Image: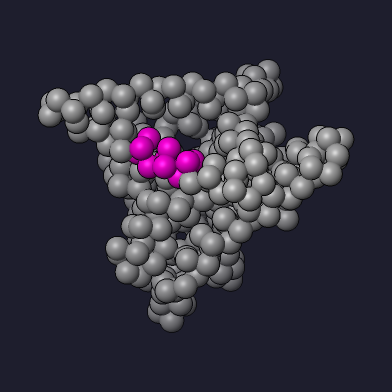
């Protein structure tokens, strides 16, 4: 099928507005990465402090800690996504390092492999060639089906299934490296898993030195549970049940309004402005809210798919 039609920013924005929203900061991307890890640190060690004080306090705060951690783990993935678009830093080497190690590796992703995959998604959004089509194609679905998906996420089943498959490919890739056989895809997965394990080892070492096993166990539990749930909800909200087609670029994705709780969990770092991102890929995440406001000023909201909140999105994607 043909590639989806791209938006022309010259038909939407004044030149000075376009320049303002596409100018990359040398510090904001770095700050957002630091912010994500500071929140992780506060949440994990705060949870550990609660467990050290009293096991009942630990039980009480752990669900909140896991929600905060899952949201920041998703946030690190979102920042890796910005790095894939070259939007974390104006210097390419700095951008790629930020997108590869402190963000992508933390949750088991490879910046360069993701970049190729993701740009194909942008080129063929919701078309047969879209590698992300499987994320939205099953919708609308039944309440029971959606509930089963959420249960699999929160019980670690999704995490186990995905990591088991990823580690199996990585093992083959490691074998190919030792024998000098071909298999570039498997070798890339092996390197991705290697970076993931290095980051986990660093986090474990910090945890043991500062406060024992508990902070790392909270991080790992969130990665296996709340992160998976928030990632799924974010994926659903972006494209499921939208009128995407090649004719109008304003239909290619959904923007979802996000309150404080949503921004802490399913919508970190302005990822809820997904229609704006698809319309103008050169806008860094920290300028997407301004882009949204400019589109409203220009009278473009009626052409867009905008939901008032994530509850409304979930109501739309069930029969």
State which quarter of the image contains the N terminus: top left
Compared across the picture, whether 5 is left or right of 159 comes to left
Q: Quadrant of residue 167?
A: top left
The secondary structure making up most of the magenta span is helix
What residue is rendered at 41% in x and 42% in y?
198
- Tell me which segment is drawn in magenta: 192-201
Image coordinates of residue 159 in percent, x first then y, are 53, 27
What residue is rendered at 58% in x and 36% in y?
220
Q: 169 or 231: nearer the eye?
A: 169
Q: Quadrant of residue 184?
A: top left
Image coordinates of residue 230 in percent, x first then y, are 61, 39
Q: 211 or 319: nearer the eye?
A: 211
Say if the magenta span includes residue 86. no
Compared across the picture, whether 291 is left or right of 170 comes to right
What residue is rendered at 30% in x and 47% in y?
112
Q: Is residue 201 visible?
A: yes
Compared across the picture, whether 179 is left or right of 214 comes to left
Say if the magenta span includes residue 197. yes
Q: Quadrant of residue 15?
A: bottom left
Q: 10 or 45: nearer the eye?
A: 45
Image coordinates of residue 262 in percent, x first then y, are 69, 49
State which quarter of the image contains the C terminus: top right
Q: Residue furthest front?
A: 209
């Amino acid at each position: 099928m043909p590639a989806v039609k791209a938006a022309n920013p010259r038909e939407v924005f004044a030149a000075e507005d376009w320049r303002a929203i596409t100018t990359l900061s040398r510090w904001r991307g770095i700050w957002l990465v630091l912010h994500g890890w500071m929140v992780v640190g506060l949440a994990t060690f705060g949870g550990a402090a609660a467990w050290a004080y009293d096991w009942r306090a630990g039980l009480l705060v752990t669900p909140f800690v896991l929600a905060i951690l899952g949201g920041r783990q998703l946030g690190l993935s979102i920042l890796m996504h910005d790095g894939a678009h070259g939007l974390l830093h104006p210097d390419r080497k700095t951008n790629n390092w930020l997108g590869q190690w402190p963000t992508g590796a933390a949750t088991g992703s490879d910046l360069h492999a993701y970049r190729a995959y993701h740009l194909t998604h942008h080129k063929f959004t919701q078309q047969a060639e879209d590698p992300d089509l499987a994320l939205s194609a099953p919708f609308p679905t039944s309440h029971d089906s959606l509930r089963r998906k959420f249960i699999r996420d929160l019980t670690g089943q999704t995490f186990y299934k995905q990591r088991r498959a990823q580690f199996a490919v990585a093992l083959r890739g490691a074998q190919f490296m030792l024998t000098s056989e071909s298999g570039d895809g498997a070798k890339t997965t092996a390197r991705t898993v290697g970076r993931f394990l290095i980051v986990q080892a660093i986090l474990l070492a910090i945890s043991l030195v500062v406060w024992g096993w508990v902070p790392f166990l909270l991080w790992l539990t969130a990665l296996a549970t709340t992160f998976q749930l928030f990632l799924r909800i974010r994926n659903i909200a972006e494209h499921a049940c939208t009128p995407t087609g090649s004719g109008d670029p304003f239909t290619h994705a959904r923007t979802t309004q996000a309150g404080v709780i949503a921004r802490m969990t399913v919508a970190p770092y302005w990822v809820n402005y997904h229609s704006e991102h698809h319309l103008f890929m050169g806008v860094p995440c920290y300028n997407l809210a301004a882009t949204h406001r400019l589109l409203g000023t220009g009278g473009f909201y009626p052409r867009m798919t905008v939901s008032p909140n994530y509850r409304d999105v979930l109501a739309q994607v069930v029969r």
